[in-house]
Image (spheres, rainbow, N blue to C red):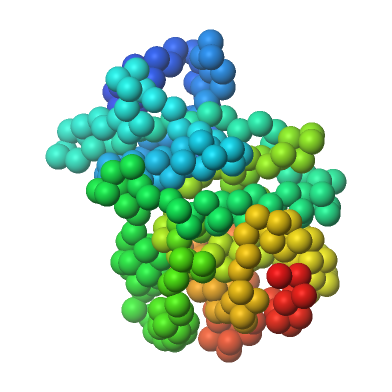
Amino acid sequence: MDPKIADRFNDDILQAALQRYAIAPDQIKLLDGFESFIYEFQRSDGYFILRIGHSARRTPAQIHGEVDWINYLSDHSVTVARAILSRNGSLVEAIEDGRGEQFLASAFVKAHGGIPRRDKINERLFLNYGQLIGRMQALAKDYIPSNPAWKRYTWDSPTNNTPDRQLPPSESLIREKYQAVFTHLQTLPTDRDSYGMIHQDAHTGNLFVDDDYVITLFDFDDCVYGHFIYDIAMVIFYMAGWGGEDIPGFTGRFMSVFLKGYQQYNQLDPAWLKEIPHFLKLREIDLFAAILFTMGENPADAWCASYMQGRREKIINDVPFIAFDWESLKKYL
């Protein structure tokens, strides 16, 4: 989290947010949050998540755009963590931070189930995962924000491109690699059938799975207008970690079932498959920059430390994030 934001947060801010959402002080629990303060709370009407972010990172209009998209999906029976109204009937509550800016509170229904365990990483999950992403992308084609001012930014906007502002000058070679893939991706078509609102971070850490393998997706904080194949590439990027010593083999098994579920709800031109390595590289560099900026060269977090090991050299030497014949998947689309 940006130290400036963390420094401005205090108990008065929290108490104001609790009052706005009718939350009893003894019914709230702090959870882990990377960019915002995240809490779980209980009321007589159920279990919910409270998120308190800051206007220096997301404007009120941008957050309204996020929750508008979430509730549009929910209204069309997609299993997402729906945003709820405050006592004032608002989806976003602004709380002055005392320094001319605001903390912005929003709340969501808590998803059913839990983060998928190893025993749930199977074909049943893969199929439902593909169906979920396919349904979202089909609905994106007709989505219009309730308020034009709430329209979210595009994937290539300065707001979304953290490497530009997070990489230090010393990482000139990484910057060159980033710019090369970024420039290529900007040349891709943005037609209705391939481009629209996407989650941009739909990995297994941002979804819960219940005992019936129903997946509920949450944390739409990074949602943008982007290429549909980008959202699929993000799923692949993080699912690869479940592949153990045979990531290519696991990727083939996962994608064959995932795409079977996906194409039940949405059709995507198989020509987009060849762009997956470029979107994987975009996320690879983006994550490298984010970890370097927030945690330094040797992060204490075990997952981040493992990710960063040899990462600079892999990026500089154009090593594919996953060595796989992506066009072999055409038969599943």
Q: Choose top left, top right, bottom left or bottom right for residue 15.
A: top left
Q: Position of residue 121 (x, y in %)?
A: 80, 51
At x 21% / y 32%, what residue is drawn? 96
Q: Is residue 13 above or below residue 304?
A: above
Query: In the displayed structure, would residue 267 be above or below residue 178?
Result: above
> Number of numbered discs present?
0
Left or right of 124? Residue 50 is left
| Quadrant in which residue 153 is drawn | bottom left
* Visible residue check, residue 201: no
Asked whether residue 94 appears in the rendered view, the answer is yes
State the image coordinates of residue 36 (x, y, percent, origin top left).
Answer: 41, 42
Furthest toward the left, the residue is 100
Closest to the observer, 21 or 133: 133
Left or right: 273 as drawn, with respect to 49: right
The spot of residue 156 in percent (x, y) is: 37, 69
Estimate the x, y position of residue 259 in percent, counting from the top left: 72, 63
Going 17% across and 33% down the picture, which residue do you hit?
98
Name the foreground residue: 163 vs 81: 81
Viewer-proximal residue among 10 and 148:
148
Give the quarter of the figure containing the C terminus.
bottom right
- Relative to 207, does residue 228 appear above or below in the rendering? below
- Residue under the image location 22 percent in, 34 percent down: 97
Residue 5 relative to residue 30: left or right: left
Between residue 132 and residue 314, name the one nearer to us.
132
Which residue shows up at 71% across the image and 81% down it?
327
> In the current view of this chain or complex, which residue is farthest to the bottom?
317
